[in-house]
Image: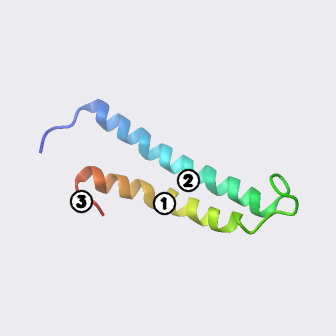
Amino acid sequence: MTPVEESTWRNRFILLNLVRIGGTIVVLLSLALWQTDIFVSGGTILGFPLALTGLVISFFGPKWLAGRWIGDGR
């Protein structure tokens, strides 16, 4: 196993946090789509599965990325 440079670790850390933030933004926008009149008058049920997808991305996306970087691939 070759040593990884400090810039690579920094970039990976930034990417992990961007995945978390992106998932959170998807959840918030999906809840707004589902429960409010911001995007669609009366809201739409489409926001619920999108919110669940955002939660899965937010929770399991960073773990999946870290596993790929380690070489585990889970």
Give the alpha-carbon distance from disc 1 to disc 3, as whole Å.
Answer: 18 Å
- Where is 43 relative to 13, above or below? below
User: What residue sits 27% from the left and 32% below the top?
Assistant: 6
Three-letter code, disc 2: Gly
**Residue 56 place in picture, x, y as percent:** 51, 63
- Packing grade of label 2 (10 A; few <14, some 14-19, many >=20) is many
User: What residue sits 30% from the left and 64% below the top?
Assistant: 74
Residue 59's disc number:
1
- Where is 38 relative to 34, above or below? above
- Packing grade of label 3 (10 A; few <14, some 14-19, many >=20) is few
The N terminus lies in which quarter of the figure?
top left
Asked where in the image residue 72 lies, by quadrant, the reply is: bottom left
Q: Secondary structure at mark 1?
A: helix
- Packing grade of label 1 (10 A; few <14, some 14-19, many >=20) is some
Q: Secondary structure at mark 3?
A: loop
Q: How many marks?
A: 3
| Callouts 2 and 3 close, C-beta under 8 Å | no
- The residue lying toward the viewer, choosing from 45 and 70, is 45
Residue 40's disc number:
none
**Residue 9 place in picture, x, y as percent:** 31, 38
Q: Which residue is disc 3 drawn over?
A: 72
What colouring method underlies this structural image?
rainbow
Judge from the rendering whether residue 41 lies leftward or rightward of residue 71; answer left or right. right
Three-letter code, disc 1: Phe
- The residue lying toward the viewer, choosing from 31 and 39, is 39
- Where is 65 relative to 9, above or below? below
Q: Which residue is disc 2 drawn over?
A: 23
| Callouts 2 and 1 close, C-beta under 8 Å | yes
Judge from the rendering whether residue 57 lies leftward or rightward of residue 5; answer left or right. right
**Residue 73 place in picture, x, y as percent:** 27, 60
Give the alpha-carbon distance from disc 2 to disc 1, as whole Å.
Answer: 8 Å
User: What residue sits 28% from the left and 49% below the top?
Assistant: 69
